[in-house]
Image (cartoon, grey):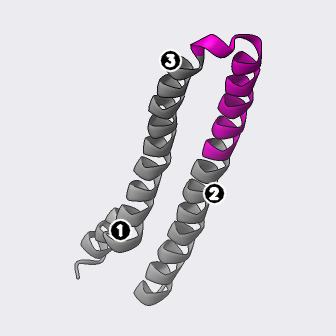
Amino acid sequence: MELAALIANVQGITIIAVAIIIAAGAIGTAFGFAIMGGKFLESIARQPEVAPMLQGRMFLLAGLLDAVSMIGIGIALFFTFANPFLDAIFQAAGA
């Protein structure tokens, strides 16, 4: 197989992997916010006097949920711009 075709193949597969990483992070974060928001509203409806305490904890968890998706985006950007799989191909080809 020609080196240029092999590089193009690895880049194409990497793009698909990056899309899956970003989509999984977005879907997971959306489900997390939906479940957390629903439970927060249920708790406030049952005991309105604990609303300030629950609100602070909800925002803490919202930050953690966002952090997980940002880590996924960081990994996806790493694969996009500094693809470690291409280095292995270049070393094998002696280029």
Q: Name the element at disc 3.
A: helix
What type of secondary structure mainly makes up the magenta span? helix
Q: Quadrant of residue 3?
A: bottom left
Instruction: State the residue position of label 2.
Output: 23
Whole-angstrom CA distance, mark 3 to mark 1, is 44 Å
Quarter of the image containing the C terminus? bottom left
**Mark 2 or mark 1, whichever is nearer to me:** 2
Q: Position of residue 20 (x, y in %)?
A: 61, 58
* Disc on res. 83: 1
Q: Give amino acid for label 1.
A: Asn
Q: Give amino acid for label 2.
A: Ala
Q: Which residues are magenta?
A: 29-50
> Vertically, is 27 above or below 94?
above
> Vertically, is 85 above or below 59?
below
> Vertically, is 4 above or below 30?
below
* Disc on res. 64: none
